[in-house]
Image (cartoon, rainbow, N blue to C red):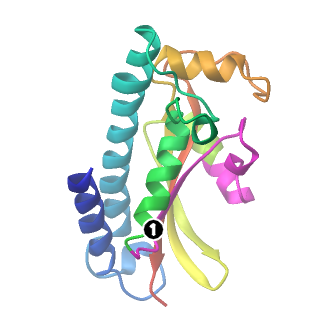
């Protein structure tokens, strides 16, 4: 965990080389598109590993289950989406302003709905072309961010079983490898 946090911190430090707000391609240093791709690779690998080698393995072997009430229960594991949210919140403790989160057109948790029309259209874009990220510059409050949305796919039966059976899920027919939503990565651009 400490090694992963160090790698994420190093990637986030690279973002410090990004200068003045404007078009992402006009910024000196490592382009934010490249930094976002690096971060995505680490976040996606950790999430897939946790989903397959912890959650699904425990489920198949009758071990500790994953549950959305893991904090209260104290005897269950966080769901993969909660694992990602917790990791994102821990990353903010490093002082970085880089943000990442899951969003979906069919969120079980209302907090995971698109926060803007551009997020909604970016989700539609990655749903149609999951091999490509949807990117752009967005303004949140007084801060400009480079925003990248990557397809978030159903990687195991555990993903689709939970989403298809959940009473708050508005989509009940996910299949393996379907795009279930998107991973949003936002990198602040200096003003």
| Among the 4 quarters of the image, the one containing residue 36 | bottom left
Report the label total: 1
Q: Is residue 6 magenta?
A: no
Which range is magenta? 95-122
Residue at 45% of width from left, 68% of height from top? 92
The residue to which callout 1 is attached is 92
Q: Is residue 162 above or below residue 100?
A: above
Residue at 75% of width from left, 28% of height from top? 169
Q: Is residue 40 above or below residue 55?
A: below
| Among the 4 quarters of the image, the one containing residue 162 | top right
Asked if residue 134 lies left or right of residue 38, the reply is: right
Q: Is residue 159 above or below residue 127?
A: above
Q: Is residue 182 above or below residue 31?
A: above
Residue at 59% of width from left, 29% of height from top? 67
Asked if residue 155 lies left or right of residue 110, the reply is: left
Residue 95, position in %: x, y? 41, 76
Q: Nearer the viewer, residue 122 or 42?
A: 42
Please, what secondary structure does the residue beneath circle 1 have?
helix
| Among the 4 quarters of the image, the one containing residue 56 | top left
């Amino acid at each position: 965990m400490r090694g992963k946090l160090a790698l994420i911190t190093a990637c986030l430090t690279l973002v410090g080389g990004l200068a003045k707000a404007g078009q992402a391609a006009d910024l000196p240093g490592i382009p934010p598109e490249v930094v976002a791709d690096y971060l995505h690779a680490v976040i996606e690998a950790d999430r897939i590993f946790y989903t397959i080698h912890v959650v699904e393995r425990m489920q198949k072997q009758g071990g500790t289950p994953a549950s959305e009430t893991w904090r209260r229960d104290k005897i269950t594991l966080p769901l993969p989406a909660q694992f990602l949210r917790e990791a994102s919140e821990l990353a903010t403790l490093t002082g970085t302003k880089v943000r990442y989160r899951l969003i979906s057109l069919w969120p079980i948790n209302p907090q995971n709905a698109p926060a803007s029309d551009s997020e909604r259209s970016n989700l539609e874009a990655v749903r149609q072309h999951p091999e490509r990220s949807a990117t752009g510059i967005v303004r949140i409050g007084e801060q400009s961010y480079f925003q990248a949305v990557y397809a978030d796919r159903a990687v195991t039966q555990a993903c689709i079983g939970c989403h298809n059976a959940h009473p708050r899920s508005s989509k009940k027919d996910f299949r393996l490898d379907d795009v279930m939503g998107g991973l949003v990565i936002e990198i602040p651009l200096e003003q």
